[in-house]
Image (tube, rainbow, N blue to C red):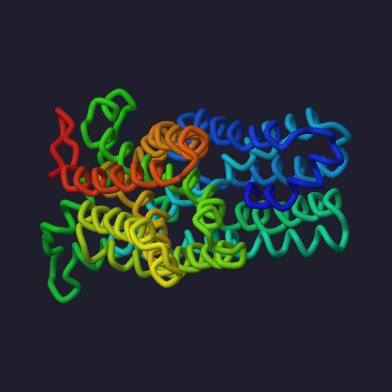
Amino acid sequence: MSSTLSVFLKPLTEDLGVSRGLFSLLRSGEILIGAALAPLVGPMVDRYGGRWLMAGGALAAGIGLVVLSQVGAFWQFLILRWTLVTVGGVFMCHMVVSVTVSRWFVHKRGRAIAMASLGQGFSKVLIPVVTATLFVSVGWRFTWAIFGVITLIIVLIPAFIFMRRSPEDLGLKPDGVEESAIDHDAAKPKFDAKASKTISADDVVWTWQEVIRTQTFWIICFIYGMANVGIAGLNLHVFAYVTDIGFSTIVAATVLSIIASTQLGSTLVWGVISERMEIRRSSMLMFLIQAIGLTLVLSINQLVPLYAGFFLYGIGLGGGWVLQELIWANYFGRVSLGMVRGLGILVTHAFGAAGAPFFGFVHDLTGSYRSSFLTFVMALLLSALLSLLVRTPRKKSVAVS
């Protein structure tokens, strides 16, 4: 529901008597709370699965959103967002979904995660429009209540009915395992070295101490931390950048639509690419596409290069949705994925929380976004290079590659 805050910013600050600067700290607090909780929620996903976590999270968030409609002061709004809504959101967030999907899929994991990410993409495109429409019709208070009821209906009930921790809980195996490992025309199972290697890597159990000692963990954290700087930081300042360099607000709004549309439209493509290209190479490609797009934007101050550059940048962002979830599962396996993903979020979200202030303060110091954009392009190129250095981590007791 964080994507709705921009629509509510003006009426909320006026009704609750709070400055926009103070109100903006709300989102930074939510990011940090989510980062702090992720290492705790991750192991719970490994142990209990996403069923009760998502149902409980939806219940908390749904109640919190309904109660938001009754607040009379900003401190009340802040407490509800940071407790019921934010905490509930962490328990039903994309991490819980992606970890569960990764447990069910191995050979077609890329496209499965891409499909699961489509909901996030559609919500990014549609929720602001729906929110604005409801706000005009029924006001901001009743709009929050409607979102609370919707959350209870579309998340709590399906999660309770359909969510299961892993295929093994139902006596099944992840996709492709039986077909890859068994020759049904033969009298006995046929050994498939590629399938065996994949499954054995997926079955490795990690502790958090072992994970943070691996070079792989820190490289992935850095490169996808950089991706989060763009998602949380650069995207917030794109509209202001476009108008600052002389284009109209209509052009700036069109740029936002281009980024959102290409990000959503490329998600499934990245899912398929990730199954046909080694994950570290597809990650490198993603970062290069973003860097090329932003370089085009910065190099030529004309409308067509502007649109083309942000078109490429949006395609790269679409890859981030898929590859950031996939790379953890591919290198650390299914069994301890929740714990590993939680530790990773703690680090990568710290990058994201710093992203918006970085672009904002550099602009305040220099009077332009050019320096911060160029710095981010260099970081993307470095991330592309570091992507090639990612290797399957090894445990002392078990070798998986």
Evaluate whether residue 343 shows in this view: yes
Viewer-side residue, 398 vs 72: 72
Residue furthest out toward the bottom: 185
In the rendered view, tell whether residue 143 sits above or below residue 307.
above
Q: Position of residue 330 (x, y in %)?
A: 27, 49
Which residue is found at the position 68% from the left and 52% from the top? 4
Residue at left 26%, top 44%?
383
Tell me: residue 5, above or below residue 210.
below
Q: Looking at the picture, how far across and down is residue 40, in whole percent?
A: 49, 29
User: How many numbered callouts?
Assistant: 0
User: Left or right: where does residue 344 sit relative to residue 367?
Assistant: left
* 151 vs 178, nearest the viewer: 151
Q: Position of residue 200 (x, y in %)?
A: 20, 47
Residue plotted at (64% across, 32% down): 25
Q: Residue at x 63, y 47 (%)?
A: 2
Q: Is residue 297 left or right of residue 157?
A: left
Image quarter for residue 293? Answer: bottom left
- Give the percent coordinates (x, y) of residue 32: 54, 31
Residue 174 seen? no
Q: Quadrant of the C terminus?
A: top left
Q: Nearer the viewer, residue 310 or 130?
A: 310
